[in-house]
């Protein structure tokens, strides 16, 4: 027996209602905000993530699935969606299409992490990116989309944490403050953090080992190093969130695990009892220099991604059932092989006219065909025997009222429309 890879999962047909409903909801929500759907490759040149997500991040250092393709090129299964969309934005010169350019995506991401509830090695993200605007109003709109999606789903236990990492200059001032602060403690830091100290001291605050140490408590706070421009941006984001009645808390500990952020960063967590440690349902922020870092023009961006598995877990924890029960309209069977062409012709016509139809592929007897129609919750049953073929008619049974009808073949669509049309 070949095993499923660790940290991956199957979605069975019987369980797919939730994810399909979610996809539809996301699609209609994206229309409301004028975002367009984008699809980028599941793997990209490794360099994209090294330069984009950052060399010193855990994601790039410890979690990527890297491989050499048969042409000896270094490739990586995407650990997140932003870098790929930025590459696509630059490659296709999308800045020429006007600003802001709003892109959304839904797909698998891959991270070699220790699997647990809500943490998978292949997981699905719904994400979006908006390019070209520096206005804090778009930061607020992006945050509001996450909140509104959760609201539309009926999710109550959510907490929005926001923070500002400031602009380039603020971050540089802060970086210097961190270097000064950690210098005397260098030997107390873990091996990874000693590298981080040299390359990107901000990452020390995010360390899973050192993050809990006593020295972290008195480490300089980024909020104290924001310059006027950064403060103003952050204040406006809050003002705009207030204007949409979106509740949030300012959490100075949110630094995010990816290097590209500037100004606004946020994480939306599940605030549900006993939810478990993987409680960040969605997160994102502004990245004013990523497009340029990856070789494009100097164009700002902002976005987020939501972990679909975690969202589904949160819905379950709040007993919210979003899966739609799928019933078919018609189940058809014939009494022998002779009538199959006639039945197929009818079934084909019905499907092309918008009805959901299944038929008997197992040559069941009449009794078992009725059982099968019940199992599929079919609203109508079509029974085709030699008499029906001869007279060019259709025998139909309403599977709820058990009423029987004999209809001329050419009237079948009209008949079913009148019975099922409004559903
Ligand atoms: P991220 O915080 O790395 O950000 O991931 C976003 C969300 O993906 C997380 O909040 C979580 O719900 C989900 N997620 C991450 N790792 C896993 C995992 N191993 N298993 C299950 N779910 C997971 C990003 O990926 C950024 N690209 C977001 C962004 C877009 N920032 C700006 N634009």
Image (cartoon, helix red, strand yellow):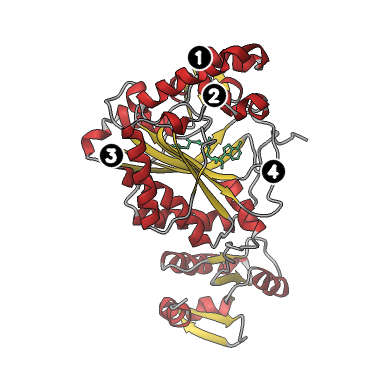
- Closer to the camera in the image, 27 or 326: 27
Helix, strand or loop at mark 2: helix
Q: Are marks 4 and 1 in contact (CB under 8 Å)?
A: no
The alpha-carbon separation of the residues under discs 3 and 4 comes to: 37 Å
Q: Quadrant of the N terminus?
A: top right
Q: Earlier in the sequence, mark 4 or mark 1?
A: 4
Q: Is residue 8 above or below residue 66?
A: below
Which of the labelled discs sits on residue 117, or is there none?
4
Helix, strand or loop at mark 3: loop
Give the residue pinned by disc 1: 199
Q: Are marks 1 and 3 in contact (CB under 8 Å)?
A: no
The alpha-carbon separation of the residues under discs 2 and 1 comes to: 9 Å
Residue that appears at 47% across and 23% down: 49
Give the residue pinned by disc 3: 133
Q: Position of residue 358 (x, y in %)?
A: 57, 65
Give the residue pinned by disc 2: 203
Q: Residue 37: in sight, yes or no?
A: no
The alpha-carbon separation of the residues under discs 1 and 3 comes to: 29 Å
Which of the labelled discs sits on residue 169, or is there none?
none
Which numbered disc, 3 or 2, marks the residue closer to the eye? Answer: 2
Q: Are marks 2 and 1 in contact (CB under 8 Å)?
A: yes
- Closer to the camera in the image, 321 or 243: 243
Which numbered disc, 4 or 1, marks the residue closer to the eye? Answer: 1
Q: Earlier in the sequence, mark 3 or mark 4?
A: 4
Which numbered disc, 4 or 2, marks the residue closer to the eye? Answer: 2
Q: Is mark 4 within 8 Å of ligand 1?
A: no
Helix, strand or loop at mark 1: helix
Q: Is residue 166 above or below residue 139?
A: above
């Amino acid at each position: 027996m070949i095993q499923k890879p660790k940290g991956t999962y199957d979605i069975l047909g019987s369980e797919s209602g939730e994810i399909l409903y979610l996809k539809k909801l996301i699609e209609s929500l994206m229309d409301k905000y004028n975002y367009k759907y984008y699809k980028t490759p599941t793997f990209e040149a490794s360099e994209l993530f090294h330069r984009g997500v950052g060399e010193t991040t855990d994601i790039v250092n410890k979690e990527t699935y890297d491989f050499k393709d048969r042409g000896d090129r270094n490739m990586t299964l995407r650990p997140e969606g932003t870098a790929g969309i930025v590459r696509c934005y630059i490659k296709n010169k999308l800045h020429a299409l006007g600003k802001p350019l709003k892109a959304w995506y839904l797909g698998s991401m891959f991270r070699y992490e220790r699997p647990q509830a809500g943490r998978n090695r292949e997981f699905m993200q719904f994400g979006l990116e908006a390019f070209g605007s520096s206005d804090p109003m778009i930061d607020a709109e992006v945050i509001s989309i996450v909140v509104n999606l959760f609201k539309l789903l009926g999710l109550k236990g959510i907490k929005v944490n926001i923070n500002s990492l400031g602009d380039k200059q603020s971050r540089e001032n802060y970086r210097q403050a961190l270097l000064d602060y950690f210098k005397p403690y260098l030997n107390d830091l873990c091996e990874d953090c000693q590298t981080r100290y040299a390359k990107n001291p901000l990452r020390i605050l995010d360390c899973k080992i050192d993050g809990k140490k006593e020295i972290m408590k008195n480490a300089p706070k980024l909020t104290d190093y924001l310059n006027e421009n950064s403060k103003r941006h952050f204040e406006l984001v809050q003002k705009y969130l207030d204007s949409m009645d979106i509740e949030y808390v300012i959490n100075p500990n949110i630094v995010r695990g990816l290097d590209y952020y500037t100004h606004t960063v946020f994480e939306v967590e599940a605030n549900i009892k006993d939810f478990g440690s993987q409680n960040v349902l969605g997160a994102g922020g502004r990245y004013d220099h990523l497009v340029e870092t990856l070789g494009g023009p100097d164009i700002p961006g902002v976005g987020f991604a939501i972990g679909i598995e975690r969202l589904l877990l949160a819905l379950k924890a709040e007993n919210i059932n979003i899966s739609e029960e799928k019933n078919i309209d018609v189940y058809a069977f014939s009494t022998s092989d002779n009538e199959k062409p006639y039945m197929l012709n009818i079934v084909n016509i019905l499907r092309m006219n918008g009805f959901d139809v299944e038929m008997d592929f197992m040559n069941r007897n009449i009794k078992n065909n009725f059982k099968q129609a019940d199992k599929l919750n079919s609203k109508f049953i079509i029974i085709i025997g030699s008499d029906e073929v001869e007279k060019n008619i259709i025998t139909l049974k309403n599977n709820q009222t058990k009423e029987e009808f004999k209809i001329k073949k050419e009237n079948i669509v009209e008949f079913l429309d009148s019975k099922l049309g409004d559903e």
